[in-house]
Amino acid sequence: MYLDIERKIVLPGEEISLEGMKQGNGIYHDNGKYYSYQMGVIQTYNSYANIIPLSGKYYPVRNDRIIGKVIDIAPSFWIMDIRGPYPGFLHINDTPWKNLDQDLNKILGVGDTVFLKVNEITESRQIWLSLKDAGLRKLEGGHIVMVQPTKVSRIIGKGGSMVNTIKEITGVKIQLGQNGVVWLDGTADKVMVVRNILKYIEKEAHTSGLTDRVKKILEESR
Amino acid sequence: MSKSADEIVYGLKREYLAKICAEGSRIDGRKFDETREAIVNTNFVPRAEGSAEVRLGNTRVLVGIKIEQGEPFPDTPNSGILTTNAELLPMASPTFESGPPSEDAIELARVVDRGIRESKMIDLEKLVIKEGEKVWVVFIDMHILDYDGNLIDACSLAAVAALLEAKVPASKIGSEDFPLPINHVPITVTFAKIGSTMVADPNLEEEEVESARLSVATNENGAVVAMQKGLGGSITREDLFSAVDTSIKVGKDIRKRVLGR
């Protein structure tokens, strides 16, 4: 169903007419009227109207696949920067490695990059991470690029169409983290092309027909 | 003090930059001796005696010049005074904190100051109002608005551009305003050592992984007027000589193209 409110840019405090949709994320109501919390774009999903913020920090959600960086080491777990409001913790029991009384530093050191998932968020807002799932691993080689966490779904595209287009045309290996950290591996000039196209998608995320334009740009730069 | 999460560099970024530098390319496609586009906007603050806003890629700095009357130092009674100060505003980068000036801010101010002072850019002896009693004091205040690497070059360029435009407010003491007496135009070019390569005008990502930093200031005659080596890494003889050559070349280009001199 396509609505007039879809893809409309709203400002904080702006009144929104839901047009029969239910109140979703980023919307509050007062005296029977609905208002936006954030500056963002309205998107509807399963009869809910949500506001996707144009920019913002990453808010971890269970089972998100993200890219983290080791910032400190505790006796039995690593403290990771996940670009969220709090650091995440990766316990040795949630990794494929066995702690045979060895120094954790020898497995993952400060500055190491890991592709992992959010395992659990406790009541006290502790974020526990895990490496126990298919495809999760320590990332080696390649380069790291940052994008807005809110734009990651746009970079993936419908059913992965956008990211697959970029992978196919450039031949660069891409690993996207939901937290806006992107890992790229390929030759220097191709990585630069992908980096620039990611910035372009980030800037143009609210416009439509983006995948075709990205395809055109990539094919021209080939 | 432990480092904040933003200050810890992704280990693979360090390896990647060293790898592509060894292969002959840079992260943003520039050549090793190529600097970013510099845009100078003078007279940015109309109420200051002189000012300049400089954009070096995405790095953005603002320099203001204030010229006031003051007492000379007892050991230099017939010379004006030059003071430089830098402020790393927290809005420019997540790693900048408010509070007393950090080590980086002090180093930045001193390197910029040295380039201007040692090149004898300003003829300080012409800034004497009454010998031993009253002289003009030139304040150079640098504000970092956006940090994307290489503050030294951006601030040096902004300070020089602002000084070139600055007017001494002599009408306050009953004579006519006059431009600052300028002898030379120093330009500073900074290099970062990544792996075994020296790259000019490092951006933020390159600065994060550099092992050593070298700033070379040259004047319009191609003479080296000031230098500063930073961080713990080492540089070779060849690195040093190539850096000086590049600095002279880039300095000429910036003087002509950006400052129009």
Image (tube, rainbow, N blue to C red):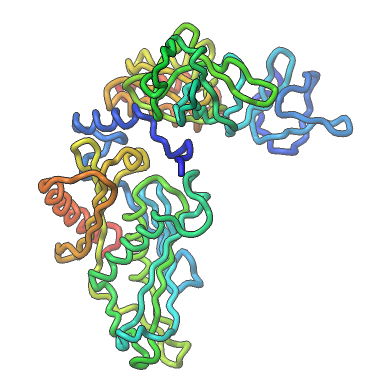
Residue B105: image x %, image y %? 41, 57
B50 relative to A179 in the view: left or right: left
Residue B139 position (above or below residue A193): below
Considering depth in this image, is A206 or A129 the residue closer to the camera?
Answer: A129
Considering depth in this image, is A65 or B146 the residue closer to the camera?
Answer: A65
Residue drawn at 41 percent across, 84 percent down: B177
Residue B246 position (above or below residue B169): above
Residue A163 in which image quadrant:
top left
Residue sitting farthest toward the front:
A101
Residue A96: image x %, image y %? 45, 9
Residue B259 in which image quadrant:
bottom left
Residue sitting farthest toward the top:
A134
Considering depth in this image, is A122 or A61 the residue closer to the camera?
Answer: A122
- Whether residue B178 appears in this view of the structure is yes
Residue B241 position (above or below residue A43): below
Residue B23: image x %, image y %? 19, 29
- Whether residue A166 appears in this view of the structure is no
Image quarter in which the C terminus of chain B is found: bottom left
Residue drawn at 46 percent across, 27 percent down: A73
